Amino acid sequence: MVTVLVAPAGIGHLPPVRVAELVSQTWTARSPGVRVVGRPMSDGGNGFLDALRAGAGGVLTPVVVDDPSGPSRPATVLLQDGANGPTAYVEPAALNLGAEDSTYAVGRLLIAARETGAERIVVGVGYMGTLDGGAGMLRALAGDERSGDWWRAPDRTAALVEEWGGVRIVGAVEDDAPLLGMHGPTYAAIERSGLDRAEADRHERRMGELVDQVEKAVPPRRDLVSGLPVRVHRRAGAGAGGGLGYALAVLGAQLRSGADVTAEAVGLDHAVADADLVVTGETTYDWRSLEHSVLSRVSSSAEVAARPVVVLCREQHVGRRESMSLGVAGTYSLIPTGRLARDVPEGGDLEDALRALVRRVAGTWTPTGSDDVH
């Protein structure tokens, strides 16, 4: 019997778990002789905890995090037992923080995760509207409730780093952006969230001030080979989550690709090896997909196992040559090439459009009555 593995990220407003459900159900209905296995994936952003729970189980613990500058926010901690010991996973993106919010609530969420007794805390660092470099998180951990001057580090920064130095923290980052510069989060926000250039410049200056304050409190260590200072703000992934990656790294966190973290937790490589065909998906298939994405991680596993990969997306901006470099055998988009993004339906219509697309793809790759993958 043919086995199809469905391992997508989110598409549009549909989170990874919902996309996996829709694709699996539709594929099974179209080709009932096929075994379809769902393994939702995440890059650390929205849907991170649900994807982990769907693929690896765990216990969800509801918590409420406070914020002196706004209302308390409901959140969830996912607890799992694994090879790395008891692990608490948290998803800051689910706090729905906006551009005017700090990451203070994220700090309270980390405290809640630590209080579960977990030996390891994994923080999903996907896209967030905040741009405070994680200063709010540091202030929450230090018990500093000042609501103004969001870009300032707490007075107890050095003591804070020592207090959290023994906690194993992993930042599951969605990209490898540094904290400062044209490739950092402030200037990316011009395209991503409509921030104007003047505001971006102001945020960039304040990010720089935050780095200066932290380095005065905690001088950078020296590289043993070059003797040069190791600048945390230049680390790949420091700019993820509006700079939340930077603050986690200041605490000693390991910054890793969110897609890699998810893949390991849900056993993606084994699932790919057991499949005949791998189906993944994401909202926009463009140059960003070529590295540090769910799509590239799934494709990498499939390449090692010599399995064909089919991509479902909302819109496509990558040509056949680039797709072949990832080992992608076929790409199917909800928006026909040359059409505008606004032409694709949203809401319930997006689910209907995805179902229609999957029926067509399933008919191409697993025709009814056939045991062969085409």
Image (cartoon, rainbow, N blue to C red):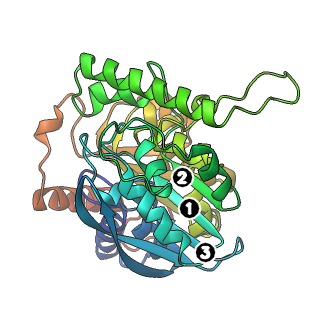
**Mark on residue 118?**
3
- Mark 1 crowd level (few <14, some 14–19, many ≥20, 10 Å Cα): many
Q: Are marks 3 and 1 in contact (CB under 8 Å)?
A: no
- Mark 2 crowd level (few <14, some 14–19, many ≥20, 10 Å Cα): many
Structural distance between the alpha carbons of marks 1 and 2: 7 Å
Q: Is residue 39 visible?
A: no
In the displayed structure, does residue 303 sit left or right of residue 324? right
Q: Nearer the viewer, residue 350 or 95?
A: 95
| Residue on which disc 2 sits | 172
Structural distance between the alpha carbons of marks 3 and 1: 10 Å
Q: Nearer the viewer, residue 37 or 151?
A: 151
Q: Are marks 1 and 2 in contact (CB under 8 Å)?
A: yes
- Disc 1 is placed on an element classified as strand
Q: Residue at the spot x=50%, y=73% of the render?
A: 55
In the displayed structure, does residue 356 sit left or right of residue 241? left
Structural distance between the alpha carbons of marks 3 and 2: 17 Å
- Disc 2 is placed on an element classified as strand
| Residue on which disc 1 sits | 122
- Mark 3 crowd level (few <14, some 14–19, many ≥20, 10 Å Cα): some
In the displayed structure, does residue 20 sit left or right of residue 262? left
On screen, residue 65 above or below 230: below
Amino acid at dot 3: Ala
On screen, residue 25 above or below 256: below
Q: Position of residue 81 (x, y in %)?
A: 62, 80
Q: Nearer the viewer, mark 3 or mark 2?
A: 3
Q: Position of residue 278 (x, y in %)?
A: 50, 59
Who comes first in sequence, dot 1 or dot 2?
Answer: 1
Q: Position of residue 49 (x, y in %)?
A: 43, 67
The image quarter in which residue 50 lies: bottom left
In the displayed structure, does residue 249 sit left or right of residue 66? right
